[in-house]
């Protein structure tokens, strides 16, 4: 500990004795000197004395499943910008190929006297039972953005997935498509389940009608997953496909073209997210745009309220998506 105090003293440009006086909250220390020592403590990851801690002294962890899906970096950026404006520091925490998990990051964040945590595309349940319990007991401010499962007791901000599916389905129906397939994420993934609910309401002719099941595919969120699902749906005679992510949609289009189907001539495809570059791929992708900036701002507002001891609404905040029509969808063309 003495060596670490020496490091703090050297960084702050004071003596170790002065550092000890600050830690003991002794009188007669100039405000500038005290500020320099407190900053040095933050730099070296040491806890400030309780008297000098404020809710905004800690980090805010941004926990993300991965950075391969372009929507995750976009949401991270939107949330980070809002947090920086509040004077809060952020720490990006994402799973790694060598096995670093959400639980590992939660442990590190709790050691750092974290001010709050924003889970993007996941759930604080990913922290595991032990750390999930500690988060609750310590009443760490939490916000979930597009949560992967149900968390009724946590502040939540989500895009309205049911409205997104309804917009996509209505668009394809207006173009004459009747046999429409659906490519979703894994079963149990809440945003996918909500899209499925809207889809079933749209295509099912009666409560007994189960024919829709052969037109729905659950896969992992990837181009490869979208491609595999599209191969099965094309065999079922679909002319339109709604996908739960842009990556799934791109994989679906690639498979369709490899099998000799024109897009949008033979099959129309709708994505979800409006990720970067979707307007310049071939063909430019019709997709459902998530209101990323509004979602980020809402998440920051909910987190800031909790940090400052204010109550936040218990119900989930749903934001409206927007259909962006491009060249991957067109009128249904009768097949020869």
Image (cartoon, grey):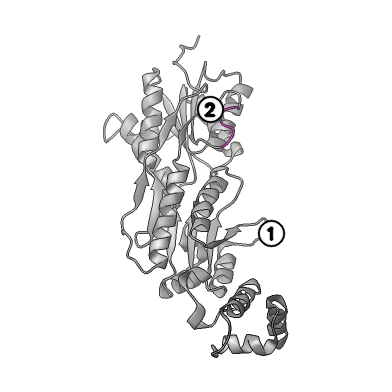
Disc with the residue nearer the chain's start (1 vs 2) = 1
Looking at the rendering, the stretch of residues picked out in magenta corresponds to 276-280
The residue lying furthest to the top in this view is 336
Q: Is residue 292 magenta?
A: no
Numbered tag placed on residue 8 in the rendering:
none
Name the quadrant of the N terminus.
bottom right
Left or right of 125, for residue 111: right
Where is residue 219 drawn, in percent x and y?
53, 42
Q: Above or below — where is 34 with respect to 197? A: below
Where is residue 16 drawn, in percent x and y?
69, 87
Q: Above or below — where is 157 with respect to 207? A: below
Seen from the viewer's position, the closer of residues 22 and 229 is: 22
Where is residue 64 drawn, in percent x and y?
55, 54
Identify the residue position indicated by label 1 in the image: 98
Q: Above or below — where is 34 with respect to 65? A: below
Numbered tag placed on residue 285 in the rendering:
2
Q: Residue at x 61, y 57 (%)?
A: 95
Q: Residue at x 61, y 45 (%)?
A: 68
Seen from the viewer's position, the closer of residues 33 and 322 is: 33
Left or right of 10, for residue 140: left
Q: Nearer the viewer, mark 1 or mark 2?
A: 2
């Amino acid at each position: 500990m003495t060596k670490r105090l020496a490091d703090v003293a050297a960084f702050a440009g004071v003596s170790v004795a002065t550092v000890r006086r600050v830690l003991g909250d002794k009188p007669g220390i100039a405000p500038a000197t005290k500020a320099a020592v407190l900053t040095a403590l933050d730099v070296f990851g040491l806890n400030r004395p309780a008297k000098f801690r404020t809710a905004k002294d800690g980090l805010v962890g941004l926990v993300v499943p991965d950075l391969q899906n372009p929507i995750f970096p976009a949401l991270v950026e939107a949330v980070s910008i809002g947090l920086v404006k509040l004077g809060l520091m952020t720490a990006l925490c994402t799973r790694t190929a060598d096995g670093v998990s959400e639980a590992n990051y939660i442990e590190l964040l709790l050691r750092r006297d974290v001010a709050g945590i924003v889970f993007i595309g996941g759930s604080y349940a990913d922290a595991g039972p032990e750390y999930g319990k500690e988060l609750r007991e310590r009443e760490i401010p939490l916000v979930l953005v597009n949560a992967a499962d149900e968390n009724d007791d946590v502040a939540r901000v989500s895009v309205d997935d049911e409205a997104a599916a309804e917009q996509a389905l209505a668009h394809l129906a207006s173009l004459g498509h009747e046999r429409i397939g659906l490519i979703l994420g894994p079963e149990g993934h809440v945003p996918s389940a909500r899209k499925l609910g809207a889809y079933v309401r749209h295509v099912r002719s009666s409560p007994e009608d189960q024919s829709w099941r052969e037109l729905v595919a659950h896969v992992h969120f990837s181009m490869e997953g979208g491609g595999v699902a599209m191969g099965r749906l094309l065999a079922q005679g679909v002319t339109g496909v709604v996908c739960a992510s842009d990556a799934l949609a791109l994989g679906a289009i690639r498979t369709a073209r490899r099998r000799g189907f024109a897009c949008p001539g033979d099959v129309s495809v709708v994505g979800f997210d409006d990720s970067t570059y979707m307007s310049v791929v071939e063909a430019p992708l019709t997709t459902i745009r998530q209101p990323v900036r509004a979602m980020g701002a809402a998440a920051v507002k909910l987190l800031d309220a909790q940090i400052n001891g204010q109550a936040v609404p218990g119900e989930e905040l749903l934001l409206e998506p927007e259909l962006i029509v491009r060249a991957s969808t067109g009128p249904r063309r009768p097949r020869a």
